[in-house]
Image: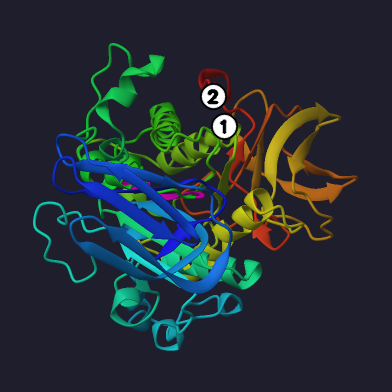
Amino acid sequence: MVLQRDKPINIWGYAAAGEKITVTFSGQSKQTVTDQSGNWSIVLSALKTSSNPQKMMISGSNQIVLDDILVGEVWLCSGQSNMEYAMRKLAKIPKPKNEKLGFPSDEVEKAKNNQIRIFLVNRKMLIKPDSIHKSWSVAQDSALRSFSAVGYFFAKELQAKLGIPIGVISSAIPGSAIEPWISETAFNQESYFKNQKVGNDPGKFYPTMIEPLTKFKIRGFLWYQGETNCFLNEKISYAYKMKVLINSWRKAWQEKDLPFYYVQIAPFNYSKTKGKVPVDENTEPELWEAQTEILRLPNTGMVSTNDLTDTNEDLHPTYKWEVGKRLALWALAKTYNQKIDYSGPIFKTVSFINNKALLDFEHLQKNSNTISGFTIAGKDGIFKSADAVVENGKVMVSAKEVTEPTAVRYNWTENPTGNFYSNGLPALPFRTDNPLTKQFKAN
């Protein structure tokens, strides 16, 4: 396995009541005595990075030896099917249309890097331990075939850029909403949900898929979920659910600033689906908007996937290697302080002058091309296709039909075709007439 560097490390287990336990690892030897129930826990002092395998000795009435342990960086990946999406699927999918993004269909066959370790959480593990992948593995062969593609490619990028061991834990369930990943008590601590009944089985997966991991020290979280909640036509409530999840997980790991990087759900024809809750062409953009609001929380980052799908009929777009790389860019820049470009344009403010809209963005580079994907509206609220160019560090948007603009939108559709990029990365969809900014309280 990989242990998290630079943090005190919890080692725990069980034995007979009153049994003396000794843990020896990396020059440390610490002892304790089990409690009346036979539980024990020892904290090792913070460990330094180590690419060389080491052994851990756990001694009591018997002895357990854990070998091939590295010390580096550990991340937890969670969410629904797009996070669970396994590496084995890459060998079977048609060649993607965007050749610039490559196509590592043979990645499992090539993967021989023993500095990347993976742990796949099996939801049946605590009930019926029948999975052969119920422990740490080197990221190769059958273990890698069953592992999260997003999680692996994130780890691969980090390992290549940092040159240290990377461990990734995947705990994801296809089709899951966000609520089952949050303990029931956590909802009660957010004022938005007071006097509200929270549906979708809150806390269902938390005791088996998340809580057992909370003693294991990690660097941060990766999250890829939202499709199930989008089918329920959620808006501001999803932003608050993400807020509760992030705050409660950080509290569970007892580190209030653990990084949380997440994926904007990909374009899909939600409006053409028939379900329990009516949805329309604004449903997905409004969920994107809710996801974007979470950027107001500290140590968060979101990657866009607007350009990572070949068809709007595919709820599981295939470019998982690029999703992993984009998440890694956020981690490399914000967690590991590398001076790199890590995000496409993110809207900040707008002003309206002389029949034009002037927009400020974070992560905006010079762009000599005419930008597509923008619309603009006047006092009548009717949006028209707009011209957009980058001038003097701002994006200038206008349309001949709109003489007194009041609002601008970009890629505000479940079928986005805009070409607004900076740093080779797409802009996040947005609307300047965003009601959530006033409604959502990040603190």
Where does residue 416 sit, x and y in percent of width and height?
53, 54
Q: Is residue 62 left or right of residue 312?
A: left
Q: Are marks 1 and 2 in contact (CB under 8 Å)?
A: yes
Q: Which residue is mark 2?
A: 442
**Closer to the N terminus: mark 1 or mark 2?**
1
Q: Residue at x 13, y 46 (%)?
A: 16
The amino acid at mark 1 is Leu
Q: Which residue is mark 1?
A: 297
Which mark, by number, is residue 198?
none
Q: Residue at x 22, y 41 (%)?
A: 34
Q: Is residue 109 above or below residue 138?
A: below
| Quarter of the figure with residue 197 | top left
Which residues, given as a range, are shown in magenta? 219-228
Q: Residue furthest right?
A: 392
| Quarter of the figure with residue 409 | top right
Q: The residue tagged with tag 1: helix, strand or loop?
A: loop
Q: Quick one: 338 or 23, which is closer to the camera?
A: 23
Dividing the image into 4 quarters, which one contains the N terminus? bottom left
Q: Is residue 226 found inside the magenta-colored segment of the image?
A: yes
